Image: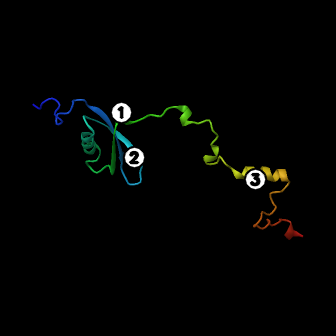
Amino acid sequence: MLPRGDPRQGDGNLEPFEVFRQEREGEPMRHGGSVVAPDPTLALHYARELYARRGESLRLWVVRRADIVELDDQDLLNPPLDRSYKKPGGFVMRDKLARARERTGQSKRTASPGRPAPADDQAGSA
């Protein structure tokens, strides 16, 4: 029997570790599961045996569950600023250009600088 306080014995407290794995290069890390171990070194060995022994994982991340921080504050996740311009389709120039043309009286058929005017359909029929 090992004396109390011996580092080989461990303190007997098991803690959960979360395992994230990558199956192929370029894929995101995904949660694979969890292991329970007395220390991070043994958690790495358990994770390798459970999630990479047969070559099904390219990379493993083993994280102590207590070290994972959850951010659920809606004020931080959804600030009250208008950031619609960052979303696809949030900054549509076509509609703004059409409104600007209407205000200035330009028609859609006039030539833009550097572009020829569109051909008139009735020009060839005269």
Are there few (<14), some (14-19), or many (20+) residues within 10 Å of tag 1? few
Residue drawn at point x = 64 percent, y = 48 percent: 89
Q: Looking at the image, which is closer to me, 75 or 99?
A: 75
Q: Looking at the image, which is closer to me, 114 or 119?
A: 114
Q: Which residue is mark 2?
A: 29
> Mark 2 or mark 3, which has the lower sequence index?
2
- Point out residue 126 in the picture as x, y percentages from the top left corner: 90, 70
Residue 66, which numbered label?
A: 1
Are there few (<14), some (14-19), or many (20+) residues within 10 Å of tag 2? some
The colour scheme is rainbow
Q: Name above or below for residue 33 compared with residue 52.
A: above
- Point out residue 74 in the picture as x, y percentages from the top left corner: 54, 32
Residue 97, which numbered label?
A: 3
- Amino acid type indicated by mark 3: Leu
Asked which secondary structure carries label 1, the reply is: helix
Asked which secondary structure carries label 2, the reply is: loop
Q: Name above or below for residue 97 compared with residue 82.
A: below
Q: Looking at the image, which is closer to me, 33 or 5?
A: 5
**From mark 2 to mark 3, how far is it between C-alphas?**
43 Å
Residue drawn at point x = 29 percent, y = 32 percent: 15
User: Can you say which quadrant of the picture contains the N terminus?
Assistant: top left
Residue 18, which numbered label?
A: none
> Mark 1 or mark 2, which has the lower sequence index?
2
For residue 121, which quarter of the picture? bottom right
Of labels 1 and 2, the one closer to you? 1
Residue drawn at point x = 36 percent, y = 50 percent: 23
Q: Looking at the image, which is closer to me, 108 or 122?
A: 108
- Amino acid type indicated by mark 1: Ala
Q: Are marks 3 and 1 in contact (CB under 8 Å)?
A: no
User: Outermost residue, front direction?
Assistant: 5
